[in-house]
Image: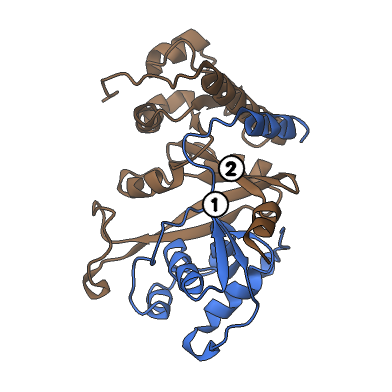
């Protein structure tokens, strides 16, 4: 799931405040996604790679769908596509509504799965 | 692909939060640990001090953008740790609730010369019963304080780990995370989350 990042692609260090109008025009002014809340580490995964009716989707929807060929976190998607988290959440919810992706929610709070926690601790020690 | 296949193929993601005052080294610590370039993602919010409810019309919304650092550590094909640097300013606190939901725990990064800068973070995680450790980022020229002195100044419980680190160093930063995860395991094993003190540090 690791995506190579070309530093020259990252325009954010070279420009001023991020453009605000366009991302929200993209989601037609909506500020909340439909359905369940999407965590920053929720994983999205494409169920099909093409939309039956691509005309009602924005290019960003389709770009997201392509990225989700392998499970990708909401945060990774926001960063990769350089869109605000709020906008990514709305676009993902749109894709979910169209049954184009599935979203896997992270473990519930509090995180008390000892086996998982030990796996994290051991993995970090090996770094 | 069926749902079960998806469940099998999606890695388990856990998140660790990096909090602390402005300029204390959160970005540096994330950068020392992440396998990818430290990435920034952005969240937008209406004017300072507004609540989490963003349903009002965008045409009346005064929008500012906050950049958030995040990094990733792949433990295995099936397990990924995400690090999120939490924006420090109080007006971004609505994002804290979102970020800290379901988090494994938090590192509160502190500078001994400006300990008061991390009071808000400590108060926040105590109130939420989120496991956390305090990591003193040892800047050149900062005076050595013993742990008891720091513990007293921060009004920390005796069980709360305090570690020293150099946020620029990968191993040192890694050790901070290991201390945190061990602390979370201890809290989970004892079956009791840390009781929050009633008072605030202010």
Q: Residue at x 51, y 38 (%)?
A: B18
Q: Report helix, strand or loop for mark 2.
A: strand
Colour of chain B, in one word, is brown
- Up-down: is B60 above or below A38? below
Q: Is residue B83 above or below residue B120?
A: below
Residue A89 place in picture, x, y as percent = 46, 64
* Residue ID at (42%, 27%): B114
- Provide residue B178's location: percent of width, then percent of height: 65, 27
State the residue at coordinates (42%, 20%). B194
* Colour assignment, chain A: blue
In the rendered image, which residue does mark 1 sit on? A41
The C terminus of chain B lies in quadrant: top left
Q: Residue at x 46, y 57 (%)?
A: A38
* Label 1 environment density (alpha carbons within 10 Å; few <14, some 14–19, many ≥20): many
Q: Are marks 2 and 1 in contact (CB under 8 Å)?
A: yes
x and y, in percent, of residue B108 in the image: 48, 31
In the image, A35 versus B65, the foreground residue is: A35
- Quadrant where the N terminus of chain B sits is bottom right
Q: To which chain does the residue with label 1 belong?
A: A
Residue at which label 2 appears: B14
- Which of the 4 quarters of the picture holds residue B117? top left
| Disc 2: CA contacts within 10 A as few (<14), some (14-19) or many (>=20) | many
Is residue B140 visible to the viewer in this orientation of the structure? no
- Check the image and report above or below for A70 versus B92: below
């Amino acid at each position: 799931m690791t995506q190579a990042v070309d530093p020259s692609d990252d325009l954010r260090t070279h420009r001023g405040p991020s453009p605000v109008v366009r991302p929200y025009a993209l989601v037609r002014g909506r500020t909340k996604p439909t359905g369940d809340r999407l965590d920053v580490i929720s994983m999205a995964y494409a169920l099909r790679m093409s939309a039956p009716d691509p005309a009602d989707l924005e290019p960003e929807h389709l770009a997201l769908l392509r990225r989700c060929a392998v499970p990708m976190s909401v945060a990774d998607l926001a960063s990769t596509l350089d869109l605000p988290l709020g906008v990514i959440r709305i676009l993902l919810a749109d894709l979910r509504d169209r049954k184009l992706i599935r979203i896997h929610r992270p473990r519930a709070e509090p995180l008390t799965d000892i086996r998982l926690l030990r796996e994290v601790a051991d993995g970090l020690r090996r770094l | 692909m069926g749902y079960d296949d998806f469940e099998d193929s999606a890695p388990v993601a856990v998140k660790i939060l990096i909090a602390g005052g402005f300029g204390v080294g959160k970005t540096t610590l994330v950068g020392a640990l992440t396998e990818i370039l430290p990435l920034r993602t952005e969240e937008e919010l209406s004017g300072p001090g507004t609540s989490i409810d963003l349903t009002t019309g965008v045409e009346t919304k005064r929008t500012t953008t906050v950049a958030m650092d995040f990094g990733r550590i792949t433990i295995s094909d099936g397990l990924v740790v995400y690090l999120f640097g939490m924006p420090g300013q109080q007006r971004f606190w609505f994002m804290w609730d979102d970020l800290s939901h379901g988090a494994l725990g938090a590192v509160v990064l502190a500078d001994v010369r400006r300990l008061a800068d991390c009071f808000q973070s400590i108060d926040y995680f105590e109130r939420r019963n989120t496991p956390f450790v305090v990591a003193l980022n040892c800047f050149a020229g900062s005076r050595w304080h013993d742990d008891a002195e720091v513990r007293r100044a921060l009004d920390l419980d005796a069980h709360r780990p305090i570690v020293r680190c150099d946020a620029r160093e990968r191993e040192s930063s890694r050790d901070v995370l290991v201390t945190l995860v061990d602390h979370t395991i201890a809290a989970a094993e004892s079956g009791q989350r840390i009781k929050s003190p009633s008072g605030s540090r202010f």
